[in-house]
Image: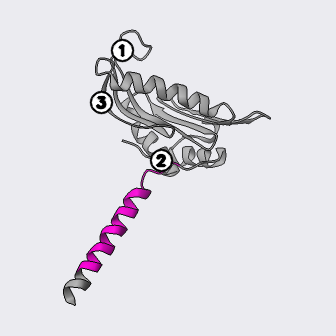
Amino acid sequence: MKKIRTLVSTLLICSLALSIAACGGKVTAKTSDEVKDACVKAGFKEDEVITNTTDEEEMLYAETQSVIVLYSKSDAAKDYFDEMYKDAEESLKDKDSFDGDYKLKEGTYVIFDGTSKDPTGQLSDQYMYGGYYYVDGTFISAFSIDKDGVDMVKKVLDALGYPKI
């Protein structure tokens, strides 16, 4: 009987660990207010975060010297993400174009940490850290083009609960 209890306890602990692991990195929809709060918590000044809402789109743009955060909720957000995903997939998987770590989850996110080596691109020999995310009609991008901005990007992504490298 003791062996059965031990086995059942072990199975319950394993299933709990698997369920907790499965929840990590889940991308959920955010509002522009949630993204603005995440930016401010990460160190953006209030006047560095600009929001704009029209009939077609809700937008947020935040920028410091090395970090950019974009938010767009619109009918075109999925098309924009798909285009960014396709471009990123091609360049990140090509070892001649990118040197670093990345993760791709089709239809959901692209996250990266490395250096662009594409001599024809605008970001040749440029360090990049961050990601592009899509969920429920919302596109969010947070990235830095130098190592000084990595901590700020990580803080934004942590506040949003989004996966990162």
CA separation in Å, label 1 and label 3: 13 Å
Q: Amino acid at mark 3?
A: Gly
Q: Are marks 3 and 2 in contact (CB under 8 Å)?
A: no
Name the residue furthest left. Answer: 3
Decide which of tag 3 and tag 2 comes sooner along the chain. Answer: 3
In the visual, does 62 lie left or right of 4? right
Classify 157 as above or below 2. above
CA separation in Å, label 3 and label 2: 20 Å
Q: 10 Å neighbourhood of mark 1: few (<14), some, or many (≥20)?
A: some
Instruction: Find disc 2 in the rendering and name its residue.
Output: 162
In the visual, does 134 lie left or right of 145? right
User: Helix, strand, or loop for circle 2?
Assistant: loop
Instruction: Find disc 1 in the rendering and name its residue.
Output: 118
Q: Amino acid at mark 1?
A: Asp
Name the residue furthest top. Answer: 120
Which region shows up in magenta? 7-27
User: Helix, strand, or loop for circle 3?
Assistant: strand
Q: Quadrant of the C terminus?
A: top left
- For the image, the number of numbered tags is 3
Q: Quadrant of the N terminus?
A: bottom left
Decide which of tag 2 and tag 1 comes sooner along the chain. Answer: 1
Query: Residue 16: x, y in percent?
Result: 36, 69
Q: Determine the residue positioned at 24% across, 78% down.
A: 7
Query: Residue 29: x, y in percent?
Result: 59, 48
Instruction: Find disc 3 in the rendering and name its residue.
Output: 100
User: Helix, strand, or loop for circle 1?
Assistant: loop
